Amino acid sequence: MRAFGLRILFWFLPVALLGSSSISLAQAVTLPYRYTIGGRTYYGASITAARYIPGLPATIKYGLSVLSQCPALSGNVFVSSQFSAGVVGYSPNSLLACRTVVGGGPSGFSPCAKFFPTTNPNFPYAFIAATNLQTCIDLAFEVPGGLSVRLNTGQGPMTFVVKAQHYQNGNLVDYLATPAAIIPSSRNTIALYDSGIGVGPRSVIPLF
Protein backbone atom coordinates (compact mmCIF):
# COMPACT_ATOMS: atom_id res chain seq x y z
CA MET A 1 0.00 0.00 0.00
CA ARG A 2 2.95 2.36 0.55
CA ALA A 3 3.85 2.44 -3.16
CA PHE A 4 0.22 3.07 -4.07
CA GLY A 5 -0.02 5.87 -1.51
CA LEU A 6 3.12 7.48 -2.88
CA ARG A 7 1.75 7.32 -6.40
CA ILE A 8 -1.45 9.06 -5.33
CA LEU A 9 0.63 11.60 -3.40
CA PHE A 10 2.55 12.45 -6.57
CA TRP A 11 -0.71 13.67 -8.10
CA PHE A 12 -0.80 16.37 -5.44
CA LEU A 13 2.78 17.61 -5.88
CA PRO A 14 2.64 19.70 -9.06
CA VAL A 15 5.61 21.89 -8.16
CA ALA A 16 7.91 18.93 -7.65
CA LEU A 17 6.64 17.14 -10.73
CA LEU A 18 6.35 19.98 -13.20
CA GLY A 19 9.43 21.92 -12.14
CA SER A 20 10.07 24.84 -14.44
CA SER A 21 7.74 23.54 -17.14
CA SER A 22 5.34 26.05 -18.63
CA ILE A 23 2.55 23.44 -18.49
CA SER A 24 0.13 24.40 -15.74
CA LEU A 25 -1.26 22.09 -13.08
CA ALA A 26 -4.72 22.37 -14.63
CA GLN A 27 -3.33 21.19 -17.95
CA ALA A 28 -1.25 18.43 -16.43
CA VAL A 29 -3.54 16.68 -14.01
CA THR A 30 -6.93 16.97 -12.38
CA LEU A 31 -7.39 15.81 -8.81
CA PRO A 32 -8.12 12.09 -8.61
CA TYR A 33 -11.64 10.92 -7.84
CA ARG A 34 -12.57 7.72 -6.03
CA TYR A 35 -14.74 5.18 -7.84
CA THR A 36 -16.02 1.75 -6.86
CA ILE A 37 -16.45 -0.64 -9.79
CA GLY A 38 -17.71 -4.13 -9.02
CA GLY A 39 -16.67 -3.71 -5.40
CA ARG A 40 -13.10 -2.67 -6.26
CA THR A 41 -11.79 0.80 -5.49
CA TYR A 42 -10.13 2.93 -8.16
CA TYR A 43 -8.75 6.44 -8.19
CA GLY A 44 -9.30 8.10 -11.55
CA ALA A 45 -7.97 11.25 -13.13
CA SER A 46 -7.80 12.90 -16.52
CA ILE A 47 -4.13 13.32 -17.34
CA THR A 48 -2.78 15.28 -20.31
CA ALA A 49 0.88 15.59 -19.31
CA ALA A 50 1.58 12.28 -17.57
CA ARG A 51 5.21 12.23 -18.69
CA TYR A 52 5.82 14.45 -15.67
CA ILE A 53 4.43 11.86 -13.24
CA PRO A 54 6.99 9.22 -12.17
CA GLY A 55 6.25 5.62 -11.35
CA LEU A 56 3.39 4.96 -13.77
CA PRO A 57 3.17 1.33 -15.01
CA ALA A 58 4.26 0.60 -18.59
CA THR A 59 0.63 -0.09 -19.50
CA ILE A 60 -0.39 3.41 -18.45
CA LYS A 61 2.54 4.99 -20.25
CA TYR A 62 1.58 3.15 -23.41
CA GLY A 63 -2.07 4.07 -23.06
CA LEU A 64 -1.18 7.70 -22.60
CA SER A 65 1.07 7.58 -25.65
CA VAL A 66 -2.01 6.42 -27.57
CA LEU A 67 -3.98 9.35 -26.18
CA SER A 68 -1.24 11.78 -27.18
CA GLN A 69 -1.29 10.49 -30.77
CA CYS A 70 -5.06 10.94 -31.05
CA PRO A 71 -6.02 14.53 -30.15
CA ALA A 72 -9.78 13.84 -30.34
CA LEU A 73 -9.51 11.01 -27.80
CA SER A 74 -10.87 11.75 -24.34
CA GLY A 75 -9.19 9.65 -21.68
CA ASN A 76 -8.91 8.78 -18.02
CA VAL A 77 -6.33 6.90 -15.98
CA PHE A 78 -7.40 4.63 -13.13
CA VAL A 79 -5.21 3.27 -10.34
CA SER A 80 -6.64 0.75 -7.88
CA SER A 81 -5.99 0.02 -4.25
CA GLN A 82 -5.30 -3.56 -5.39
CA PHE A 83 -2.15 -2.46 -7.24
CA SER A 84 -3.63 -2.53 -10.73
CA ALA A 85 -4.03 0.30 -13.20
CA GLY A 86 -5.52 1.05 -16.58
CA VAL A 87 -6.38 3.72 -19.11
CA VAL A 88 -9.54 4.27 -21.15
CA GLY A 89 -10.16 6.51 -24.12
CA TYR A 90 -13.08 7.26 -26.41
CA SER A 91 -13.39 9.37 -29.52
CA PRO A 92 -15.83 10.65 -32.14
CA ASN A 93 -13.24 9.76 -34.79
CA SER A 94 -11.68 6.52 -35.98
CA LEU A 95 -8.82 5.18 -33.85
CA LEU A 96 -7.03 3.51 -36.78
CA ALA A 97 -4.19 6.02 -36.52
CA CYS A 98 -3.76 5.19 -32.84
CA ARG A 99 -2.79 1.62 -33.73
CA THR A 100 0.44 2.85 -35.28
CA VAL A 101 1.85 4.20 -32.02
CA VAL A 102 5.47 3.16 -31.54
CA GLY A 103 5.55 -0.34 -30.11
CA GLY A 104 3.24 -1.88 -32.67
CA GLY A 105 0.12 -1.85 -30.55
CA PRO A 106 -0.86 -2.42 -26.95
CA SER A 107 -0.57 -6.21 -26.85
CA GLY A 108 3.00 -6.07 -25.57
CA PHE A 109 2.01 -3.79 -22.70
CA SER A 110 -1.34 -5.10 -21.56
CA PRO A 111 -2.83 -8.59 -21.30
CA CYS A 112 -6.19 -7.27 -22.44
CA ALA A 113 -5.79 -4.08 -24.49
CA LYS A 114 -8.61 -3.42 -26.95
CA PHE A 115 -9.63 -0.99 -29.65
CA PHE A 116 -13.35 -1.45 -30.33
CA PRO A 117 -16.46 0.30 -31.70
CA THR A 118 -19.17 1.41 -29.29
CA THR A 119 -22.93 1.87 -29.60
CA ASN A 120 -22.67 5.54 -28.61
CA PRO A 121 -23.11 7.83 -31.66
CA ASN A 122 -21.18 10.67 -30.02
CA PHE A 123 -18.16 8.49 -29.13
CA PRO A 124 -18.29 5.48 -31.48
CA TYR A 125 -14.66 4.41 -30.90
CA ALA A 126 -12.99 3.33 -27.68
CA PHE A 127 -9.72 2.01 -26.28
CA ILE A 128 -8.90 0.17 -23.04
CA ALA A 129 -5.58 -1.09 -21.68
CA ALA A 130 -4.86 -2.30 -18.15
CA THR A 131 -2.39 -4.31 -16.14
CA ASN A 132 -4.69 -7.29 -15.66
CA LEU A 133 -7.87 -8.87 -16.99
CA GLN A 134 -10.13 -7.86 -14.11
CA THR A 135 -9.15 -4.21 -14.43
CA CYS A 136 -9.82 -4.27 -18.17
CA ILE A 137 -13.30 -5.66 -17.49
CA ASP A 138 -13.93 -3.07 -14.78
CA LEU A 139 -12.79 -0.20 -16.98
CA ALA A 140 -15.13 -1.29 -19.76
CA PHE A 141 -17.82 0.25 -17.56
CA GLU A 142 -16.06 3.61 -17.88
CA VAL A 143 -16.46 4.04 -21.65
CA PRO A 144 -19.62 5.01 -23.56
CA GLY A 145 -21.91 2.51 -25.20
CA GLY A 146 -22.79 -1.08 -24.48
CA LEU A 147 -25.57 -3.41 -25.56
CA SER A 148 -28.92 -2.93 -23.81
CA VAL A 149 -30.78 -6.03 -22.63
CA ARG A 150 -34.04 -6.45 -20.72
CA LEU A 151 -33.90 -9.02 -17.92
CA ASN A 152 -36.40 -10.30 -15.39
CA THR A 153 -35.32 -9.65 -11.80
CA GLY A 154 -36.84 -10.00 -8.36
CA GLN A 155 -38.05 -6.40 -8.78
CA GLY A 156 -39.54 -7.11 -12.19
CA PRO A 157 -38.13 -6.47 -15.70
CA MET A 158 -35.11 -4.17 -15.72
CA THR A 159 -32.80 -2.74 -18.38
CA PHE A 160 -29.10 -3.55 -18.17
CA VAL A 161 -26.15 -2.75 -20.40
CA VAL A 162 -23.64 -5.45 -21.35
CA LYS A 163 -20.23 -3.76 -21.24
CA ALA A 164 -17.67 -6.58 -21.50
CA GLN A 165 -17.36 -10.31 -22.19
CA HIS A 166 -14.89 -13.06 -21.33
CA TYR A 167 -14.70 -16.81 -21.88
CA GLN A 168 -14.44 -18.87 -18.71
CA ASN A 169 -13.90 -22.61 -19.15
CA GLY A 170 -15.34 -22.36 -22.64
CA ASN A 171 -18.46 -20.46 -21.52
CA LEU A 172 -19.09 -16.88 -22.58
CA VAL A 173 -19.70 -14.59 -19.59
CA ASP A 174 -21.39 -11.20 -19.90
CA TYR A 175 -20.51 -8.34 -17.54
CA LEU A 176 -23.32 -5.85 -17.13
CA ALA A 177 -24.79 -3.06 -15.03
CA THR A 178 -27.74 -0.72 -15.07
CA PRO A 179 -27.29 2.23 -17.46
CA ALA A 180 -25.09 5.04 -16.16
CA ALA A 181 -26.12 8.68 -16.26
CA ILE A 182 -22.49 9.82 -16.58
CA ILE A 183 -19.02 8.39 -16.97
CA PRO A 184 -16.73 7.92 -15.24
CA SER A 185 -18.80 6.84 -12.25
CA SER A 186 -19.03 4.15 -9.60
CA ARG A 187 -20.83 1.05 -10.85
CA ASN A 188 -22.41 -2.04 -9.32
CA THR A 189 -21.67 -4.81 -11.81
CA ILE A 190 -22.87 -8.37 -12.28
CA ALA A 191 -21.60 -11.31 -14.32
CA LEU A 192 -23.98 -13.75 -16.02
CA TYR A 193 -23.47 -16.61 -18.44
CA ASP A 194 -24.40 -15.49 -21.92
CA SER A 195 -26.35 -18.71 -22.42
CA GLY A 196 -29.00 -17.22 -20.12
CA ILE A 197 -29.08 -13.90 -21.97
CA GLY A 198 -28.45 -14.83 -25.58
CA VAL A 199 -26.37 -11.82 -26.58
CA GLY A 200 -23.51 -13.78 -28.15
CA PRO A 201 -20.15 -12.23 -29.07
CA ARG A 202 -20.61 -8.72 -30.48
CA SER A 203 -18.02 -6.35 -31.92
CA VAL A 204 -19.47 -3.49 -29.84
CA ILE A 205 -18.74 -5.40 -26.61
CA PRO A 206 -15.04 -5.78 -25.82
CA LEU A 207 -14.12 -9.46 -25.45
CA PHE A 208 -11.18 -9.89 -23.06
Image (spheres, rainbow, N blue to C red):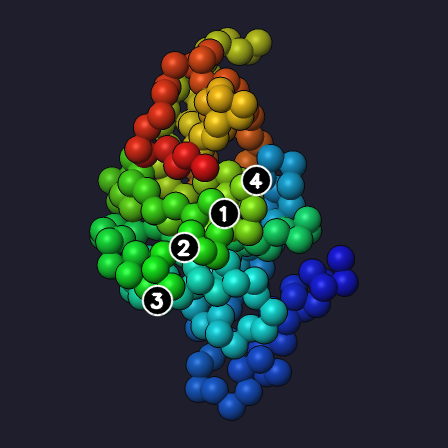
Q: Amino acid at mark 2?
A: Pro
Measured Cα–Cα span from mark 2 to mark 4:
17 Å
Q: Secondary structure at mark 4?
A: helix
For disc 3, the marked residue is: 102
Identify whether 14 is placed above or below 61: below
| Camera-side mark, 1 or 4 | 1
| Camera-side mark, 3 or 4 | 3
Q: Residues within 10 Å of mark 4 (few under 14, many from 20)?
A: some
Percent of width and height locating residue 193: 50, 18
The tag earlier along the polypeptide, 2 or 4, is 2
Identify whether 55 is placed above or below 151: below
Q: Amino acid at mark 3?
A: Val
Percent of width and height locating residue 50: 49, 70
Q: Amino acid at mark 1?
A: Pro
Is label 1 in contact with label 2 (beta carbons under 8 Å)? no
Residue 68 is left or right of residue 2, and the answer is left
Is label 2 in contact with label 4 (beta carbons under 8 Å)? no
Q: Quadrant of the C terminus?
A: top left
| Camera-side mark, 2 or 4 | 2
